[in-house]
Image (spheres, rainbow, N blue to C red):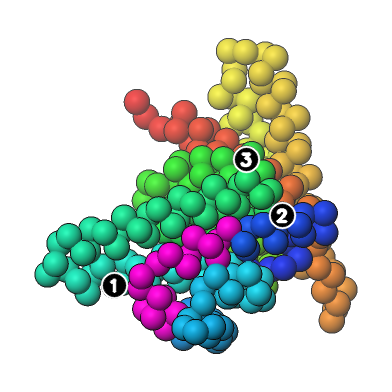
Amino acid sequence: MSQPFSRAYCIPEAAQEDSSRMRHRLGRFASDFKETHVIVARIERETGARVPVIGGYSLDSFFRKAALRDVLDGITHVYQALLQEADKRGRYPSDAYTLRQAAREWRDFVARVLAEEHTTYEVDSDCNVRYAVDEAYALNRKATLNGLDAARWASVKGEFERAFDAMDGTEQDTNAAIRAIAAAVVEACGKIVIGNGASRFGSSEIQKYLSPLVRAMYASDNVAADASQQIVGSLSDWTNATHQYRHGQGVGVEVTAPVSLAVQMLTSGAAFIRWMIEIDTARQPA
């Protein structure tokens, strides 16, 4: 399960008013929970933040006034605290059901608030808050992961998940994200070209080994075959571009990749991986 996270700088300056509304809405909803002590205990234990006491613990005040990183982490901990308490009350089915329903309602409410207030966050099915760029970014991530379920792609999937997790982490590590997505693409391409004459994989191997395989795949369609070679060329260029953040910088110097560039590299890398899966599937015996 991914960890809670937050980064105040992920919300653009123009969206600060939306952030305030987000905080108010979350706090108002959370203030109605009856399991306040359980929720507070988890938030304080896991984040180190203090929940204000105003005649009693005030989750409303916490969500309105706490540091943004603690607010976003707190979203996840509210959900997890409710489920944990439901498990403890397993001998009382009606109580457990009510708590699990409350957890689901919280998750769904948070998802709606984050979208309606135009933040750069989203929640997954476990109410983990993660970095959201746009719908295309999210769909790319999900579609590629779905294609990597087979055991054959386990190593690729591991690197791919590390790439996106690096963008979700408490400290957004764009260089680590680029290194991981590059490793995932190398692994995916290696499944196809290694064993066909290549013992390693890089931009030169793309042209030498992958190019003819792709041309053969589209042999019955000259236009597609020619177009595919241009895409192979872009993959070669993309691979060379990732080297700038893998091992292309000067000794003792590390320049951090801009978030926008990391997003572009992850999105393109995901598309290349899905193409490699399609090529590999086409080459397998019927």
Q: Residue at x 58, y 75 (%)?
A: 62
Is residue 41 visible in this depiction of the protein?
Answer: yes
- Whether residue 32 appears in magenta in the rendering, the answer is yes
Q: Which residues are magenta?
A: 25-42
Q: Residue at x 23, y 58 (%)?
A: 97
Q: Residue at x 29, y 63 (%)?
A: 99
Is residue 5 visible in this depiction of the protein?
Answer: no
Rendered image quadrant of residue 216: top right
Residue 85 tag number: 1
Distance from label 2 to label 3 (Cα)?
Answer: 19 Å
Circle 2 is placed at which residue position?
A: 18
Q: Earlier in the sequence, mark 2 or mark 3?
A: 2
Q: What secondary structure is marked by label 3? A: helix
Instruction: State whether residue 140 is above or below residue 229.
Output: below
Q: Position of residue 159 (x, y in %)?
A: 54, 59
Q: Main secondary structure of the magenta part?
A: helix
Rendered image quadrant of residue 276: top right
Circle 3 is placed at which residue position?
A: 135
